[in-house]
C-alpha cells in the first residue's frame, strides 16, 4: 500500500517592502495617496500612515510597476504627476526599505492637447499629435499635456534598471496615455557627437522601454528618431 503522506509544502518566497511618500507642495500623504505594486495579474495596494509611511508585509519576488497614485484633489491627475518606476524584488533575505522618500510632484508645465510643440521644461520639446493618443480609463476625456522636471537624486525612485549618467528626467501626463510623439532636447550643453539614450517607463508592460538614441549636434541640441510611447516617466542618460 502507498503510505506516503508527504504533502507539497513549497511556499512562494515573499519579502516585506516599505517606504515613505511626500507631496512636494506639503500636502499630507495620509488618505491622499495610493501606493501600488502591480504585476501582470493584479495590483497590490498600500495606504500611507500619518507620517506618509507605507508597508507591504509580504510581496512575492518578481518585477512590479511601482507607482504612487495621487488622490489629493477632485482632479488629482491634472494637478499631480504620478511617479512610475519598475522595481524588482529578487531576494527574501532581508526586508526592503527604500532609501529616500518618494515625491509626488505638482505639474509645472501645461499645454493643450493640440498639434503643436510642447515645452516640457529643461530643454525637452515634444511634438504633440492630438490624433495619436490612446487615453486611459482614469482620464478618458483628457485634453491637456503636462510635465514636471524631476531631480533623479531627489525623486526617491530607485531606478534599478537605468544605467548611465542621467542628464534629464521628467514626469508626464495624462498618466499612462499611449502616444507616438517625437521629441528633442535643446541646449544640452554637451559636446557635438555626444550620444544619449532615452527610456520610458511602461506601466502595463512592467518595463523600461528603450526609446533609442539621440545625438548632440553642433548647436548642442540632441535629436534622433526616438518617440515617446507612454506619458509617464522619461529618463535620458549619457551613454
Image (tube, helix red, strand yellow):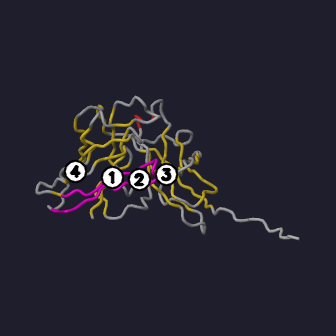
Residue of label 2:
155
Q: Residue at x 34, y 30 (%)?
A: 143
Q: Which residues are magenta?
A: 193-215
Residue of label 3:
66
Location of the N terminus by quadrant is bottom right
Q: Distance from label 3 to label 1 (Cα)? A: 17 Å
Instruction: Check disc 1 and report its element: helix, strand or loop.
Output: strand
Label 3 neighbourhood size at 10 Å, few (<14), some (14-19), many (20+)? Answer: many
Q: Residue at x 40, y 28 (%)?
A: 141
Judge whether 219 appears above or below 194 on screen. Answer: above
Q: Which mark is residue 185?
A: 4
Judge by depth and name the residue closer to the eye, 56 or 143.
143
Identify the mark nearer the N-term, 3 or 1. Answer: 3
Instruction: Check disc 3 and report its element: helix, strand or loop.
Output: strand
Q: Distance from label 1 to label 2 (Cα)? A: 10 Å
Q: Nearer the viewer, mark 2 or mark 4?
A: 4
Location of the C terminus by quadrant is bottom left
Judge by depth and name the residue closer to the eye, 228 or 51.
228
Residue 208 in picture, x, y percent from top left: 40, 55
* Residue farthest left in this picture: 218
Q: Which mark is residue 169?
A: 1
Judge by depth and name the residue closer to the eye, 177 or 77.
177
Residue 110 in the figure: left or right of residue 64: left
Magenta-colored stretch includes residue 230: no
Q: Residue at x 60, y 53 (%)?
A: 55
Amino acid at each position: 500500500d502507498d503510505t506516503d503522506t508527504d504533502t507539497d509544502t513549497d511556499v512562494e518566497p515573499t519579502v516585506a517592502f516599505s517606504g515613505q511618500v511626500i507631496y512636494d507642495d506639503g500636502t499630507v500623504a495620509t488618505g491622499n495617496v495610493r501606493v501600488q505594486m502591480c504585476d501582470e495579474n493584479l495590483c497590490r495596494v498600500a495606504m500611507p500612515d500619518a507620517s506618509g509611511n507605507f508597508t507591504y508585509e509580504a510581496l512575492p519576488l518578481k518585477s512590479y510597476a511601482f507607482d504612487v497614485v495621487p488622490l489629493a484633489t477632485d482632479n488629482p491627475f491634472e494637478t499631480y504627476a504620478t511617479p512610475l518606476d519598475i522595481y524588482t524584488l529578487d531576494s527574501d533575505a532581508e526586508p526592503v526599505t527604500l532609501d529616500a522618500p518618494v515625491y509626488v510632484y505638482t505639474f509645472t508645465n501645461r499645454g493643450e492637447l493640440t498639434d503643436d510643440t510642447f515645452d516640457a521644461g529643461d530643454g525637452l520639446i515634444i511634438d504633440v499629435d492630438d490624433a495619436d493618443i490612446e487615453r486611459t480609463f482614469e482620464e478618458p476625456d483628457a485634453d491637456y499635456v503636462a510635465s514636471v522636471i524631476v531631480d533623479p537624486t531627489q525623486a526617491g525612485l530607485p531606478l534599478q534598471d537605468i544605467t548611465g549618467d542621467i542628464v534629464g528626467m521628467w514626469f508626464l501626463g495624462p498618466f499612462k496615455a499611449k502616444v507616438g510623439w517625437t521629441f528633442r532636447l535643446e541646449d544640452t550643453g554637451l559636446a557635438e557627437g555626444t550620444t544619449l539614450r532615452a527610456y520610458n517607463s511602461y506601466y502595463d508592460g512592467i518595463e523600461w522601454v528603450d526609446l533609442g538614441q539621440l545625438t548632440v549636434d553642433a548647436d548642442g541640441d540632441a535629436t534622433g528618431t526616438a518617440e515617446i510611447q507612454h506619458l509617464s516617466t522619461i529618463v535620458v542618460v549619457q551613454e
